[in-house]
Image: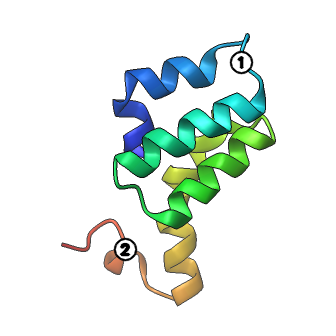
Amino acid sequence: MALVARRDDLRGALKNPFLGAATKIAIAREILERAGADAKTVRFILLLIEHGRLEILQEVAAAVPEAWNERLGSPPSRSLRSSP
């Protein structure tokens, strides 16, 4: 998810109100794939773009480790974030 934050070209394209969702998806796919983003990450970001919900990306990314740990039944001290 930090990949989107680091890429000024991607962020600029995704915020451009003159580009439609299909164009934004094509641009995002190309940039993310060239950057070596994981296939699941690419699909997830494209889904958010398609549904006009990209603004929640940071919130979702922040919530994933906690949700993953809850699913695994891990105690807070063994969080996903604290893994090496």
Front residue (pair 78, 55): 55
Is residue 81 left or right of 64 when viewed as pictured? left
Is residue 48 left or right of 68 when viewed as pictured? right
Q: Position of residue 63 (x, y in %)?
A: 55, 57
* Residue drawn at point x = 51 percent, y = 52 percent: 61
- Residue bearing the label numbered 1: 19
Q: Which kind of residue does numbered mark 1 sit on?
A: Leu
Q: Position of residue 79 (x, y in %)?
A: 37, 74
At label 1, counting other C-alpha atoms closer than 10 Å, the crowd grade (few under 14, some 14-19, many 20 or more) is: few
Q: Position of residue 62 (x, y in %)?
A: 49, 51
- Residue bearing the label numbered 2: 79
Residue 27 appearing in the image: yes
- Image quarter in which the C terminus is found: bottom left
Residue 58 appearing in the image: no
What is the distance, in whole Å, between disc 1 and disc 2 at their CAs?
Answer: 39 Å
Say whether disc 1 or disc 2 marks the residue closer to the N-terminus: 1
Front residue (pair 68, 77): 68
Front residue (pair 74, 16): 16
